[in-house]
């Protein structure tokens, strides 16, 4: 009798658990919906979203798919992350509701999530999107997802050939999806596709040509298509010129030294500093004596940060230290350097070869005059000072430092501007993410036309502008940095914040670093980070962000 009662009790518990879950899911869905237009309740909303992801319930997954087009972009990113990381399988819902959704953003994010999850039931629908979706970004995401799934499934996967054929067909589109397909085909080491990928180098869409360059790199086919890449390096688009030069410099042996000397020499003399900077780095990747020859020849004509880049590149390639005096490197090369063997090749650093000089090393080595911003050297180059002016900037710096954070930022900026050399190009920027609904964002700049030369008048205008800027709203790092990157003259950003981002596309540290790396490929801006508040997590966030962008981190929480 006792055993029968225990069994009945166990069945009752199981029955209750099974039928209680939908009620909990319904409550969480309601909470997500009820808080949708409440800016200050988005943390609670995300908590409910996580519970939906953990529930494994189809209705919960459907709500998360719907949120892939939420007005709050950080909610979209969070929903996508939850779907990728869910222990239960949301693939059926992502395929049916996500890939079939009327909103392109939902289809795009669903495709990327399926690729990340290695959803083996998704390729048929993804291939349909790749062939015929009206949205270019959706087709590109489908190509990326198909490549990711095929790579994880390996050569013996029964659908591999069909996927490869559809990726090859996508090359004919000549748009971003063709570029994505070219890259995936290269990473999959697809047979007999190098010539077809090289054909995409003639496309008019920059994203297509960039993808083709990267696809040839992945296939190790750049030496065989050096002439095609050399032609692409003469493109009117700076992104294509960068990608083509990077591809040419991926070879182990130079196929035509005269051709390389001509093309890479033009890259170092390019009118766009972004091409010159990535060209300098690409020559380190090439790791040939021609690299040293071209860099030494360019150094006398280069100024500012790019001259420092050349010095660092020469140090890496030769193992020699001549400081930052241009004449010293010229004398060395004309003396013994021309015949000196290269240093042993070093592994490529995680964040690339470009790096900021150590504090004090430029001055000691004969470099020009600099100012400082929270002890970070500020050189005479086009600079953007970007401020996180969220509401928490009204708080004291710390328990032992009563100074208000925004006041500390203003005071330090005034000192920096007073010390900078005359005519140094600069600007001040704030990305506003207001605490209201409907969502409103705004880019504010001291100078609406971009960086301006430092004069007494512009210095006074900048100080007056920042004095009049209130601390309010939320912090969005990525969008603020992209606002600075959008000025093609800006070479360095000094980013000041009191914590991690709370709004915008990327609030996850790893995702932000990855997104910045992608953006910096074609806008190789150095980003320095200054922390004026917050705790250990905020310090880790700011430090990793700055280091990933070739910059340095300054902890200003003890400054008064």
Image (cartoon, rainbow, N blue to C red):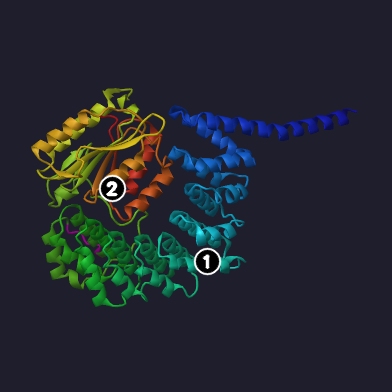
Residue at left offset 15%, top offset 37%: 417
Nearest the viewer among 507 and 281 is 507
Nearest the viewer among 437 and 184 is 437
Please tell me which of labels 2 and 1 falls first in the chain: 1
Residue located beneath label 1 in the image: 166
Dot 2: few (<14), some (14–19), or many (≥20) neighbours within 10 Å? many
Q: CA distance from mark 2 to mark 1?
A: 36 Å
Residue located beneath label 2 in the image: 485
Q: Quadrant of residue 543?
A: top left
- Residue 20 to residue 306: above or below: above
Relative placement, left or right, of 417 versus 127 is left
Span highlighted in magenta in the image: 318-322
Relative placement, left or right, of 538 versus 264 is right
Residue 167 in sight = yes
- Residue 216 to residue 406: above or below: below
Residue at left offset 39%, top offset 49%: 515
In what quadrant of the picture does the N terminus appear?
top right
């Amino acid at each position: 009798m006792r055993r029968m009662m225990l069994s009945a009790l166990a069945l009752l518990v199981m029955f209750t658990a099974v039928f209680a879950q939908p009620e909990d899911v319904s409550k969480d869905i309601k909470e997500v919906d009820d808080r949708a237009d409440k800016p200050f309740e988005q943390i609670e909303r995300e908590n409910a979203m996580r519970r939906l992801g953990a529930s494994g319930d189809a209705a919960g997954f459907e709500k998360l798919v719907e949120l892939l087009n939420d007005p709050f972009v950080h909610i979209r990113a969070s929903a996508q992350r939850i779907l990728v990381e869910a222990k239960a399988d949301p693939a059926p819902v992502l395929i049916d509701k996500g890939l079939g959704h009327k909103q392109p953003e939902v289809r795009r994010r669903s495709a990327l999530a399926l690729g990340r999850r290695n959803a083996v039931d998704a390729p048929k629908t993804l291939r349909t999107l790749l062939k015929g979706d009206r949205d270019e970004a959706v087709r590109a995401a489908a190509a990326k997802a198909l490549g990711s799934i095929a790579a994880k499934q390996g050569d013996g996967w029964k659908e591999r050939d069909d996927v490869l054929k559809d990726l090859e067909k996508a090359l004919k589109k000549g748009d971003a999806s063709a570029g994505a397909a070219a890259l995936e085909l290269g990473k999959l080491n697809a047979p007999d596709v190098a010539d077809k990928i090289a054909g995409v180098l003639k496309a008019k869409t920059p994203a297509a040509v960039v993808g083709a360059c990267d696809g040839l790199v992945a296939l190790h086919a750049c030496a065989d298509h050096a002439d095609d890449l050399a032609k692409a390096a003469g493109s009117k688009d700076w992104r294509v010129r960068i990608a083509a030069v990077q591809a040419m410099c991926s070879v182990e042996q130079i196929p035509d030294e005269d051709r390389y000397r001509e093309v890479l020499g033009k890259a170092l003399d390019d009118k766009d500093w972004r091409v010159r900077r990535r060209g300098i780095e690409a020559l380190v990747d090439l790791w040939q004596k021609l690299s040293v020859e071209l860099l030494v020849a360019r150094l006398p004509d280069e100024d500012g940060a790019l001259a420092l880049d050349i010095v660092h590149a020469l140090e890496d390639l030769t193992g020699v230290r001549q400081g930052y005096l241009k004449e010293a490197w010229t004398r060395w090369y004309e003396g013994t350097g021309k015949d000196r063997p290269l240093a042993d090749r070093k592994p490529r650093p995680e964040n690339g070869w470009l790096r900021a000089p150590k504090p004090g090393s430029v001055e000691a080595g004969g470099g020009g005059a600099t100012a400082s911003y929270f002890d970070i050297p500020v050189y005479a180059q086009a600079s953007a000072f970007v401020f996180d002016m969220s509401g928490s900037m009204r708080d004291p710096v710390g328990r032992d430092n009563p100074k208000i954070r925004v006041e500390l930022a203003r005071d330090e900026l005034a000192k920096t501007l007073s010390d900078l050399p005359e005519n140094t190009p600069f600007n001040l920027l704030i990305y506003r993410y207001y605490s209201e609904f409907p969502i409103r964002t705004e880019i504010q700049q001291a100078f609406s036309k971009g960086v301006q030369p430092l004069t007494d008048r512009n210095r006074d205008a900048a100080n007056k502008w920042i004095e009049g800027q209130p601390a309010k709203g939320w912090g969005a790092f990525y969008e603020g940095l992209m606002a600075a990157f959008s000025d093609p003259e800006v070479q360095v950003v000094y980013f000041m914040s009191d914590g991690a981002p709370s709004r915008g596309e990327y609030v996850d540290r790893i995702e932000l670093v990855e997104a910045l790396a992608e953006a910096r490929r074609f806008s190789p801006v150095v980003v320095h980070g200054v922390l004026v508040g917050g705790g250990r997590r905020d310090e880790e966030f700011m430090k990793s962000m700055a280091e990933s962008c070739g910059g340095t981190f300054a902890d200003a929480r003890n400054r008064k």
